[in-house]
Image: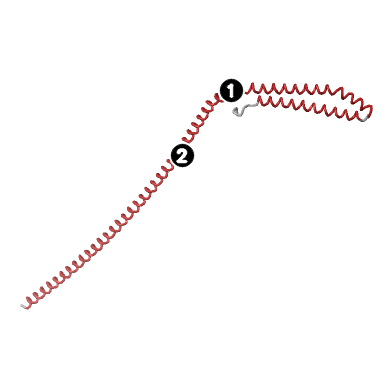
Amino acid sequence: EQTQEQTQEQTQEQTQEQTQEQTQEQIQEQSTQEEQRQEQSTQEEQRQEQAQEQTQEQTQEQSTQEEQRQEQAQEQTQEQTQEQTQEQIQEQSTQEEQTQEQTQKQTQDQTQEQAQEQLPQDQQLQQEQQTQEQPQEQQAQEDQVQEKQTQEEQVQEGQAQQEPVQIQTQEQEQVLDPNHSENINEDNNIQQQEQVQNEQENKEQQISTCLLYTSPSPRDS
């Protein structure tokens, strides 16, 4: 009986020990499982944080890219508008130049046409004036020639009348005063010079009348 009791006690002790070991193992397993769970949870949290960071970075990159695209689009639109405005300005300037050239050509053509139209009218007027002026000028020239002839005749007659008287006076003066002959010669020379001057003046008058007759009218210019 004692042995049985001892055996029973031993068995009980063994069973207790086994149960304790099992419980400890279970506890250890649970703790390890919890640790694993905690590690997994921490890993998941880290993964989530990384995913959030990545998403944030991607969103930031996308936003920056969109901003850059918008800026590029704005710059392109500005450049296009500037080019269009410059082209419009150039087209306007070319159009204005063309219009100015056309107006100038039109005015030149009009002036030429007017000048061509006025030329025959001016020529007719000039011809009429010349036809009217020619007889008047011819009459004036004839009158001048007649006056000159009469003046020359009068001068010749006066000289003819004065010659015998001068000869007599000269002879008398030579008899009385031999120096007086020199004075007479000087007087004759002076008269001859005056005659020459009168003739030259008459010739100049004739030339001036001819020049007036042949000079072009101011309308020709």
Q: Nearer the viewer, mark 1 or mark 2?
A: 1
Q: Could you tell me which residue is drawn at 7 percent across and 77 percent down?
A: 5
x and y, in percent, of residue 119 in the image:
55, 25
Q: Amino acid at mark 2?
A: Ser
Label 2: few (<14), some (14–19) or many (≥20) C-alpha neighbours in 10 Å: few
Badge 1 vs badge 2, beta-carbon distance below 8 Å: no
In the image, residue 36 sits, relative to residue 113, either above or below, namely: below
Q: How many numbered circles are shown? A: 2
* Disc number for residue 93: 2
* Disc number for residue 197: none
Q: Could you tell me which residue is drawn at 89 percent across and 24 percent down?
A: 168
In the image, residue 200 sits, relative to residue 12, either above or below, namely: above
Q: Is residue 140 left or right of residue 35?
A: right
Q: Nearer the viewer, residue 148 or 83?
A: 148
Indicate the secondary structure of the residue bearing disc 2: helix
Q: Amino acid at mark 1?
A: Glu
* Disc number for residue 128: 1
x and y, in percent, of residue 23 in the image:
15, 70
In the image, residue 160 sits, relative to residue 90, either above or below, namely: above
Please identify the quadrant where the C terminus is shown. top right
